[in-house]
Amino acid sequence: MPRSLLTPLAALCTALAWSGSWITGKLAVASAPPLEVSTARFIIASVVLVAITLATRASLGRGRLWPVVLAGFFGYCAYNAFVFVGLTMAPASDGALIVPTLIPVLTALAASFVGERLTPAKLGGFALASIGAALVIAAGQTSGEISSRRLVGDLLMLLGAGCWAIYTVLGTIALRTRSPIAIVTIAAPIGALCLIPLGFFEDGYADVGGWNVTVWLNVLYLALVGSVASFIAFYWLVRRVGAGVAAMTSYLVPILTLAMAVVLLGDRPQPLQLAGGVVILAGVRLATLSLAREGQPMPEGAA
């Protein structure tokens, strides 16, 4: 497959996985404690990643471990703690529409501290895509009152977005000496270890044996698709195009979430939501238009 097609395909697959994670995450926390669900997710993901690494004899790389350790804490522990607790207070649509709006802007700003240039094209693309996402959010919030509980949930999700931005930039540093699969394989167990104590503040894992098949299927999706596959693909994108542009993958999530709602739930998107989707795509295109003129693309990862 041509390299020019591989990058957008990886971005699309990553966004699809994330869109599905909002739906499966909401379904999982409807029947099980959110922090326990997050812990189970990353324990399973860690086992699978270690198995893949051993089977493929992939190198874990050398160099400083602190960026990977912090990435595991912010990207897997803190992000999931904030987002999954937020999902118990607010609809999944809030997270799928609000969180992706904030992540690219925060990531682009944070990435400027590690050497990525904020060009006029990137800034214009971020601004345009943010306007599009705001249109989608505004259209989705026009009905019903917004309760204080829902606002707290949205705030927790926004905090999670900040943690994901930090995770992405830390990954940029780690990618200088490690492959995408090496970073995820090291970071996932760290995230799981940080999450394990938090589960004891809920039901202490005494309820895990009683989880039904639906909960476990959702947890497996979150672990295998939403963690293993999408996180490796995302870090491949970070290495390929940089943290700021790779983070714009999340701008596709609101559009894909709306499409999934139409196909799976029979929802009918409002015209303003569709218009916002078009503006988001235009912003992503503008921000990535100048990539070829900014120098050679970053080498592809091992994953």
Image: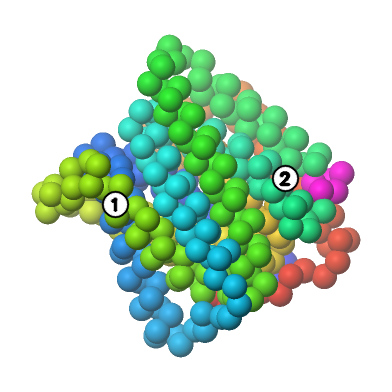
User: What is the three-letter code of the residue carrying label 2?
Assistant: Leu
Q: Position of residue 192 (x, y in %)?
A: 36, 59
Relative depth, front residue between 87 and 138: 87
Q: Is residue 57 visible?
A: yes
Residue 197 is labelled as 1
Q: Residue at x 38, y 21 (%)?
A: 149
**Residue type at the position of mark 1:** Pro
Q: Nearer the viewer, residue 85 or 141?
A: 85
Q: Is residue 254 left or right of residue 219?
A: right
Q: Position of residue 50 (x, y in %)?
A: 38, 76
N-term mark: 2 or 1: 2
* Vertical comparison of 9 with 63: above or below: above
* Residue name at image x 51 percent, y 24 percent: 140
Taking the image as shown, residue 258 lies to the left or right of residue 224, namely right
- Residue at numbered disc 2: 109
Per the rendered image, the range of residues in magenta is: 118-122
Please give the label number shown on residue 81.
none
